[in-house]
Amino acid sequence: MPVHNSDIADFFATLADLLEIEGANPFRVRAYRNAAATVRSHPRRMADLIDEGMDLAELPDIGDDLAGKIQTIVETGRLPLLDEVAQRTPVELSDLMAIEGLGAKRVRRLYDELGIRSVEDLRRAADSGAIRELPGFGPKTEEAIRKRVEAHAGRERRMKLADAEDVADALVHWLAGCDGVREVVVAGSFRRRRETVGDLDVLVTASKGAPVMQRLADYDEVDEIVSSGKTRSTVRLHAGLSVDVRVVPQVSYGAALVYFTGSKSHNIALRKRGMRKGYKVNEYGVFKGERRVAGQTEASVYAKLGLPLIPPELREDRGEIDAARRGRLPKLVTLEDIRGDLHCHSKATDGRDTISRMAEAAKERGYEYLSINDHSKHVSVAHGLDRKRLLAQVRAIDRLNAKLDGIVVLKSVEVDILEDGSLDLPDDVLKELDFTVCAVHYQLRLTRRKQTERILRAMDNPYFNILAHPTGRLINRRDPCELDLERLLEAAHERGCIFELNAHPDRLDLNDEACRLAKDIGVGIAVATDAHSVDGLDTMRYGIDQARRGWLEKKDVVNTLSLAALQKRLRRR
DNA sequence: GCCGTTTTCGGCCCGACTGTTTTCAGTCG
């Protein structure tokens, strides 16, 4: 079993925790944490990069030493330095660091003075009142720890963006009703449009902070006030989401928006760049000495750093600052660029609406075309179409198109990729269609090699056009399939096949990193909703968010093409 | 341990809030 990037990242993160507990050089600790983040978010496996002979020290925050350690982990599955440190400092202490309010210093004290090694030990100590007796701790700290241990046990996973949006909209509306408030905007990963959010960072501009904080405390949905100050408060909502609210004066709006939008690593990179230019950058502005030289707008902050405004979706420290500096930022695709939807269902299988209603709804959304992609027969739970029913649907769509004005319905199918890589309908049926969307629905847990070969084989079929929801993942519910995505993308590029970015908020499959990989390899992306009703068509915007996070431009997305250009693009070379 | 428009050494982002202190350490984002 090859070592995954997340395993390597876990080794480094744990080592960082233990070293910090031991009081090691904080910058060395940070180096391991940075390396963990780099490895964790890298779209390619370290093992594969090593196989290809890449020097891992070329990766950001990885030097010669850590490149060597990664190699050792890949080869042996162990990190000798971690084993050595674990002899002195129990590995479980790293788990305690994950509890809110506990950092290295406190974990160390709890271990040294009370012998606390595990979350369970901590719970017992808090219940017995032992913690409050420690110098530097007190009753309030003990109570806070007790609460956090419980919260940790029932900890919510990151919330899907679409769900967080409902929570955020209501909260923004409430806060905007406070006297003296000018702007209320949700920043953080929400504004960067990450597929899930861990908390909400709400930025408010107002002349005085206190009334805003009172307004927040009065909000019905607040379950617990975690902390509360004049300019910053943290609360936990009944929905399980933490909310940070920060109030800044209007003159700092842009700087604060940059700061609270993040990401953290993007901010650090910006600040370093500011320092080199002799500026101090914080949430109140850009300063030359005591003098504020920018900060009213985001653009003014970036401009002072010699950069154009960088769209929030790109602010992940994945090369966007360098691209901005060189004037090479992508011109990201927008919802307005989209001319049609290439994955929709109808009543014929598991959809809710008729083809003609779907077509009207697409027209209302300003589309030029919409395809109907009902399931094939293998998906029996959806009453999938066999050859006869699909051919009947094709004729029905022809008749419908003759009547429709201003919208064209494309004849398609979501044909199953069977376990042996063949398609669930014969070629002589598929050739009657405008194009196909092909998908894996069963046998999702094959080995990486088998799953990859299954899809490669399917792509060999000349009627294969678009690979739908390529990894099969469901956010927070089902992990992606084991796949050699890069190999599949290379194959798609050679064969003129397209990858879908499924816009359903539960899927968002491909993810951002994979979109960027597809773009680099030159594979076209279809951003498609997989709508099972007319309402489903509106999830397109989540797909566009993800596409933008993947650096995709209009030219990378096939359903920005006119109908004629799309039809040409769908022809396999 | 990483890194370089002050480059191979000497830096490494910066401010708010809390609790336990009497001026600040710890933690967080």
Image: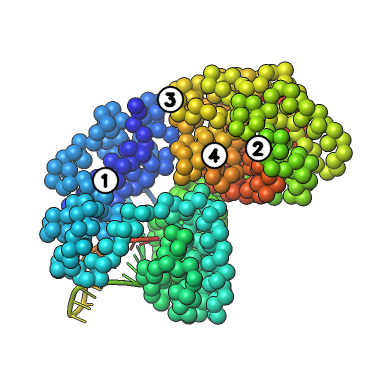
Of circles 4 and 3, the one toward us is: 3
Residue A447's mark?
A: 3
Between discs 4 and 2, the one toward the N terminus: 2
Query: Depth-wise, is mark 4 or mark 1 nearer the camera?
Result: 4
Q: Which secondary structure, mark 1?
A: helix
The front one of A549 and A227 is A227
Quarter of the C terminus of chain A within the rendering? top right
- Do the residues indicated by labels 3 and 1 lie within the same chain of the protein? yes
* Amino acid on which disc 1 is placed: Thr
Mark 2–mark 3 distance (CA, rounded to whole Å): 29 Å
Q: Which residue is mark 2?
A: A350
Q: Earlier in the sequence, mark 4 or mark 3?
A: 3
The residue lying at 47 percent from left, 42 percent from top is: A477
Q: Which dot marks residue A279? A: none
Q: Can you tell which quarter of the image residue A87 is in?
A: top left
Q: From mark 2 to mark 1, how far is it between C-alphas? A: 46 Å
Residue A62 location in percent, x, y? 33, 41
The residue lying furthest to the right in this view is A403
- Check the picture and name the quadrant holding the N terminus of chain A: top left
How far is the residue under mark 4 from the one under mark 1? 30 Å
Q: Chain of mark 4?
A: A
Q: Nearer the viewer, mark 2 or mark 1?
A: 2
Q: As shown in the figure, which amino acid type bears the numbered disc 4?
A: Asp
**Residue identifier under label 4:** A509
Q: Chain of mark 1?
A: A
Circles 4 and 2 on the same subunit:
yes
State the residue position of label 1. A14
- Taking the image as shown, residue A471 lies to the left or right of residue A60, namely right
**Dot 4: what SS?**
loop
